Amino acid sequence: MTTNMPDLMSQTWQVHTETPPTPATSVRDALLHKFDIDELLNCMHCGFCLPTCPTYQQTGLETYSPRGRIALMKGVADEKLSIDIEFEKNMYACLGCRACETACPSGVAYGKLIETAREVIEDNKKCQGNPSFIRKLVLKNVFLHPKRVRTFGTALWITQALGLQKLANKTGFIHILPREIAEMQHVVDKVASPSKRKERRPILRSEKESILKIGFFKGCIMDEMFYETNQATARVLSKAGCDVVFVENQACCGALHAHSGEKSDATNLAKSNIEAFEKAHVDFVVNNAGGCGAALKDYHHWFANDPEWKERADSFVAKVRDANELLVELPPLSFHKPLNVRVTYQDSCHLAHGQGIRNQPRQLIRSIPGVELVEMSHPDSCCGSGGIYNITNFSMSMDILDDKMEDVQHTKARLIVTSNPGCLLQMKEGIIRAGLQGQMEAAHIMDLLDRAL
């Protein structure tokens, strides 16, 4: 795209008057009506977001910055730019880390803007009869169906149990896969067997007098690839005085669909979750994944124009808590096992920037006997995971990760702790890339707490 950015910025500052769509409204006009023009105009192009944006820091390109992307959105909304391949590339180059929201003095809701831009892109493709086969396979034929996600987990367990993953790595056969998948598979831990999963009780009772009845949001991939972390989280919550209910019929949180421009699918998943947890009659809905939690807390925004579901979404969101957030509000945990380890904490972007939860995980880490917490220079800078960004934008993701690992190494920590599964896998990959195997490990904060308990 050869558009001059300063000129584009000045052009797109023009006041845009919205008119309600009519039956004669073109498909393009219907798509552009999705943009929140008032929110786009809130951006003052001051540049406070630039130092916080990982893709801008890597490239120095204005179109790879939050204000640059907003300017492009304005250009499309005002029909000065096309919804073309270049626009798509710039929108999907964004990690969605939302660090720009923390830095923005105007409070621009950038996360919602980037989701809208991607929704416009994907709806435009559908109108042109050009949907992606892979997108349809993954987003519609897998993640919309919890049973199929479980089948994926079982298939992964079979692959590991038969030694096929080790064999493929040993023989080099793994390299027939795309590089990004071949490299990231190294950091996938052994998944739980189907028989192990059957041992899970529907309710894990509090180990002392019950204070709360909480519904545990398992997540989709989280429960398949990090089953033991979910179990550890439930144990920690039970030790804190909670009856933990593994609510039936819950679905994917919808974050992957919302971030990928499939908003209608995201809202359908949200409806399934709202209904499931309403029937459970729990005090709180608790999760242990920063990305999932940010999506769950956004449900009321997803239904802002749907009066039938808005009130139910409001009630659901009022109950949503991250596990770190809830644990610091409960009586202190009683630790019995000093760990004697130097730790650094990597903020999950969607936990820190999306939910504003920063101090609670640190408070919990510091409460563990023998743990020394050493902060990085930039603990809340993105690690490059971004959901599936390390698959779809592998090179950029690894560049961001390498910078993060330099920051990690300066702490001389032996343990990197985080609160999101994607971040955890990314930091494990970072340890391998930095040649620190045997010197450093990465762990979810709930696993760390469980280990100390």
Image (tube, rainbow, N blue to C red):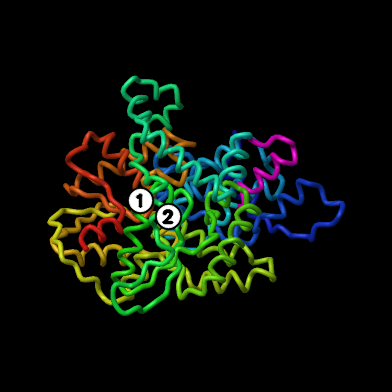
Q: Could you tell me residue 2's position as x and y percent? A: 59, 34
Q: Which residues are magenta?
A: 116-132
Disc marking residue 13: none
User: Front-most of 117 and 368?
Assistant: 368
- Determine whether 201 is above or below 416 in the image: below
Q: Which residue is mark 2?
A: 99
Q: Secondary structure at mark 2?
A: helix
Q: Is residue 322 visible?
A: yes
Q: Could you tell me residue 373's position as x and y percent? A: 19, 58
Query: Residue 429 colored magenta?
Result: no
Query: Mark 1 or 2 closer to N-term?
Result: 2
The residue type indicated by label 1 comes to Ser
The residue positioned 15% from the left and 54% from the top of the image is 341
Q: Which residue is mark 1?
A: 381
Q: Quadrant of the N terminus?
A: top right
User: Front-most of 52 and 260?
Assistant: 260
Q: Could you tell me residue 132's position as x and y percent? A: 63, 35
- Dot 2: few (<14), some (14–19), or many (≥20) neighbours within 10 Å? many
